[in-house]
Every structure is written in structure tokens, then in C-alpha cells.
Image (cartoon, coloured by chain):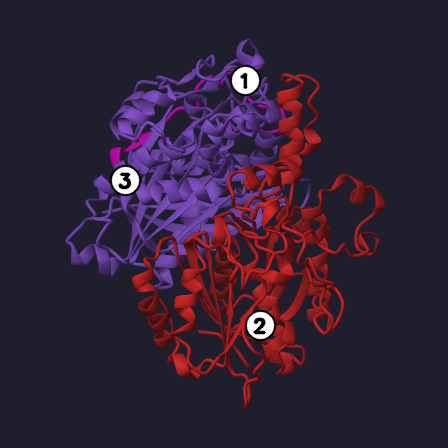
Chain colours: A red, B purple
Amino acid sequence: MENCYINGIGCISAQRSFEKDYLIEPIVYSEENILKVVKPNYKDYISPAAVRRMSSGVKNGIVASTMAINDAQIESPGAIITGTGMGCMQDSEKFLNNLINHDEEYLTPTSFIQSTHNTVGGQVALGLKCKAYNFTYVNTGVSFESALLDGLMQVENQGGQNILVGGIDELADHTSKLYKLIEHTKSDDDVPYDIVNKRTKGSISGEGAAFFVLDKEKTANSYCKLADVKFVNNLEASNLETFVTDFLASNDLIASDLDAILLGNNGDIEFDSYYDQSELLFGGAAILYYKHLFGEFMTSSSIAVSLGSDILRIQSIPGALFKNEVSHPKGEIKNLLIYNQYRGKDHSLILLKNV
Amino acid sequence: MSNRVAITGIGIISSIGMDLEENLNSLKNSRHGISKIEHIDTKLKDKILVGEIKKTNQELESILKLPQKNSWSRTSMIGAIAALEAINNAGIDVKDDADIGFINATTVGGMDMTERYFYDFIDNPENRRYIQSHDAGNNTHNICDYIGLNGFVTTISTACSSAANAIMLGARMISSGRLDKVIVGGTDALSKFTMNGFNTLMILSDTYNTPFDEKRKGLNLGEGAAYLVLESEQSYKKRSKQPIAYVSGYANANDAFHQTASSENGEGAFLAMKKAFEVAELSPKDIDYINVHGTATPNNDLSEGRAIINIYESSDKVPEFSSTKPFTGHTLAAAASIEAVFSIFALREGLIFPNLNFKNKMKEFDLTPVTELEYKEVNTILSNSFGFGGNCSSLIFTKSH
């Protein structure tokens, strides 16, 4: 079995994540319950005609994947694997809007074509003329984790090289309205938002795209080792400890071996108790969170992998990520665990190791 | 044969039958399921034919005994019916098994409900429970909760090849030792969204679809669901279960040509078939029958036919083949698992199902599909599935002796 290294990263998010050291002075959000991405200069990556035609998710996916490929200094990936919870919602809404408001008349194919879940995977392949394996996962809170596991299996079991893996979700206006109606997004009345100290129903909604190049060879640019990924659809709170300790044991670790834990806290009063409980399992580790800066979306754990990879490579944790008081680990940061769940379902663990 | 993975259970629902037996009977008697649409109010009603399951949502709800106020899409309901049959067919108990997974495939997810209530949701709190059924994963979660499966669960959406990719991932999960058993397949219900989408692409036929025919006019959309239970050797031996067939080869490649059209020579299709043979450690001449993707669009059949001829080097070496889409219509994310079940029927019963409606050979090449039901021993089948985004997948099924 081969090792799997993360050798390149590209990330578009509600922070200026296309720049180096962007978390030294992060954008602080407290008045917004919907966080849109900070737009990169799309025209540096995509032709102006395509910039006009493509939805933001497709554009962000293309930019983030190009950044990851450039960062890893590779030509063409050995596979393209994407995850998206909601898929291409903007084009889905456009087509639905025409369908409903024009009573099935005057429809054009463009938004239908661009509404399919594998649009980003297909477009990235098309742009790179890459004929390799191309999969898209769409399982709510573990859409990205599924893609990451597939990538890990490609490298570990099949000796795959330069596997491109990414998570993408985009906000769309009407759908955002609907998610507010059913309180998946925090109410406008809950302002100002503070996901640690003021838990209310729902989360702060976000969007983003993060891509990674996975490979069996360690390079000068390697961020860390992707050691393992595991997820389950349902998990009783009482089984959380076993879920975590079994996962650690299968990687020859115990809880005290972990130096940092990146948790998916989103301030949802109904489901954040899972994170409270998980914190109790890790005595000495630095407890980190990130959704106050990036928002919640079905593939937001792709942002966590990008943050965790950066932390392991530079061996330093940005102050804005500490959930409680800032307390840097004393020695080397060796093992970093990411725990996420989505509205009480789709629990996932991702283990990153220093190289 | 190191990569082969056992199939120990199957389940299906389609426009030609509510279960395995009905589907097999329809196939044996050349009884297709293509008709005018009854259950969706659409302007396309008199313009297109579809492969519709002739049960209303209320009838499906009562088959599943769902509570009256549920938030299930039609996609979830037909998926649960087929998944349940696959589990019973395999004789496994899902609830007490931590090493069983579920890999679903869908393209529409809960779009049938979203398109019904999209703007109505704002004023009508009653229907808001359907808002969260839109996302694909929610449909998979419904099915898993219904069958009581807690464990590894994911969903694939790569357009018309989705279920082939679910089967492929399942086989890889078993052969890498990550799972003992996994339920794999796909489900898609008809929706106005997809019917109108395909209509704008001008690839829907106004009559019965005729794959690989010179005069083919396009596809009939269909709905359905099918699942296979894949199992490791250690697992089925432990419970003294005989496999019904094997998944022996699988591969996915990308055409990287166009977002919706296939390249003229079907390069992605060629690569997928070639790699599937490598995984199976078989050569093209080992194949007794090809269940082609054969959607009856001008583009697909030309591209697929050329790719197959390239694999076999000349058209006279191509084995017997047929598309079963004239029976069911093109069921999108379910197509590859429905056709996998048909392939398992072919292996088990020694049958080759006809490519209904075929009359005229295409002028571009000398390929004639099987047009009458044939009784003969079938040991190895190649099954193709291609989708938007250049997504091309091939699977190889072999008989259990």
C-alpha cells in the first residue's frame, strides 16, 4: 500500500484564500448569515465568454483546480474526482424558473446542460483534455469526503498519481431563501452572529471550492500526508467515542497522539452538541473551528482539509481558528484530525499527518 | 480473475415490472414499457413517449407503508422498493451489520418535488417538508433509514453512467477490503425538469426508440431503480451463499470532447472498454454479448458503434449485442444498474434480449443488433454506459459456475 501525500491546493472561499497567509488578517463576519466567496480574478483563469456563461460554482471549481494543479506543478491529473452537495444550483434555478414561469415554453438547453452535478468535473476534464477517471459524489455532508476517499484509494491501492480531488458548492438566491424558511440558515433576527457563544437554530450558510492534488510521491511542495478518511450516515451520540477511537486505533493512534482537532461547529443549537462531546475526547489537543470564517455548506470540510494541510506544513496555527483561548501546541504538530457532521447525519473523520 | 467481486442479490423496478419476476417476464415476451406519460402534468404529454412506472406516488407510498406526511420524492420511493428486493434476494440482514455499505446513484434526486413546489414553498408551509428532499444525498438517506442501514453511505451523480460508477466503486470497496457487503445501484424518477431538458437538446423521440437503426430519432426517457448486493468471498462463504454472478471488470474514462455530446470516434468509450478488459484480465473475444448503452440518439449510437468496432478491430468480430432501452426507456442514473440486472438474467437464464424496434442498419458501419429473443449459453457480458460531461463507463459481468 502506497502513502498518500497532498502536494497541491487551491481554495476559493469567503476569505481571500487565493492569497498566501490570508488568515493573518481574516475577514471577520458577524452581521451576515450568508457568506459568499471573495471572487478571484476569474479572467486570469477562464476566457471572458466562459466567465459570463458559467455559474459561480463552475468558475470557482475551475479556478481552485487550476490553482491546485499549478501549486503541485503537474501537467494533467491521473483522475478528476469532485464532490458537491447541492450541485449546480444556479443553473438548476434558472432552468426551473423558465420551466415554471413560462409554462414549459421558450426553454434553452444551456442552463439544463450546466445544471448536472458533474458539470465541474466535466468542465475541468474538458479544459485539460484529461481523459482519465472522472467521478462526482453527491451525498449531502460527505460529498467531499467521498471524493477524498476515492482519491485516497486510487493512490493507496492502485498506485494512482496526481489525483485531483475537490469539493464545490454554490449559493443560489431562491434556494437560500428556502433554507431560511426551514431554519437551516440562521434567522435574520439572530444578528449579530457568534457561533460559539450564541447558539441558535441553523447555521451561517456559505459556499466555496477547494481542490487538492494527491500523489504517492512526497515532493518539496508536500503539505502533509492524507492518512485516512472514514464516514457513516448515522451515528448515535453515544457511539461517537467508539467511532473516533476505532478510527484512531486503525491508524495506530490514541486520542492523546492528536495535536490539533478541527471541528465543524456552526452554532446550530440542534446539532453542535456532537462537537461538544467530541471535544471531551481530546485532552491536550488544540481545539480549532473554521465555519465562523467560511460558513457552512455541504462540502465545507474541503476548506478544513485546506486549513489542516497549511497548519501541518507551516507548523503554526492562525489565531482566528482557536475555538477557546489561543494555546499553541508545545512541540511539533504531527497529527491533525478533522471531525464534521451535517445536521446530525453524515459524520466524517479525516486524519492528516505531518511529513 | 483476482479482481472479481461476487453478486449475491438483485432487485429492480422499471416500466416493465415492479420486481425481478415481472421484469424477466416482460423481457422474455418482448413486452416493452413505453407509453404516453400519465402521472406528470406536462405540455410534452402528447409529444413524447416515456418508460413510466404506472403507479401514482400515493400507490408507491402505500406499498412502502410511509406515513401520510412524509417528505419522500418519487426517486426515493422507487429506490427503496428495488433496494428492499435486492436485500431480500441476497438474504442478508442489514440492521445488525456494521460492515455493509450503500452506494446510490441519482441525477434528479428530489427534483420531482422541487419543480412542483419551488415557488409555492414560500406561501405554503405545509409543503416545506419537501425542501430538503431536493438534494441527492437526502434521497439516499431516506432509503438507508428505511432499510435500517447505518454505515458507509455515499451517492454518485455522473449523469447517465451514474449507476455503473456506483457498481464500480462498490467493487473497489470490496476488493480493497474496506467493506464485506455493499448495496450498489441507482434510482431516477421522471421529472418535468429532465423531460424538458432533454427536449431542449432535441434528442427525444416522438415515437418508440430504435437503437442502432439508421432512422433512429432519439431516446425515450424512463424511470426506474435497480440494486445489486456485492459481497466478498469471505463474507458469502461464511453464510454459505452461492453468488449469482460476478463483477469482473470495470473502468471509467472521460471523452473530454464536449459537455453533452460524444466524440465522433468514441474515444472515451474505447478507453473505458479497454481498461475494463485489463481489470478483468479478459480480452474482447471472451465476450459473448454486449449490452450496449444504445440510447437511440444519432450521436450516441454512432460514437458507441465506432468505439466497439475499434475495440474489436473490425465489425465482423463484434459479438452479439443489443440495447434494452426500447423496453425501459433511458432511465438515466438507474440505467446501468437496470441493465446490470438484465445482464445477470442473461447469464443466469441463458438468454439474449432483443433490441426491439430495429429495422435498418446504420449506413456508417455494418452492425446489426440481436432482434429476437435468443436462448444460448452466455458466460461473459460487457455493459456500457455513457453520460454528459464525457463520462464513459464499462462493466464486465461473468457467470457463476
- In terms of secondary structure, what is the magenta stretch mainly? loop
Along the horizontal axis of the image, is B344 left or right of A53?
left
Instruction: Name the residue tied to disc 1.
Output: B360
Q: Is residue B361 above or below residue A154?
A: above
| Picture coordinates of residue B346, whole percent (x, y) | 32, 34
Q: Where is residue A170 in the image (x, y as percent from the top left)?
A: 64, 47
The Cα atoms of the two marked residues, 3 and 2, are separated by: 41 Å
> Residue at the spot x=51%, y=19% of the render?
B209
Residue furthest toward the top? B46
Q: Which residue position holds label 3?
A: B86
Residue A81 image position (x, y, % from top left): 57, 55
Circle 1: element type? loop
Label 2 and label 1: CA atoms lie apart by 60 Å
The chain carrying label 2 is A
Q: Is disc 3 placed on a helix, strand or loop?
A: helix
Q: Nearer the viewer, residue B240 or B288?
A: B240
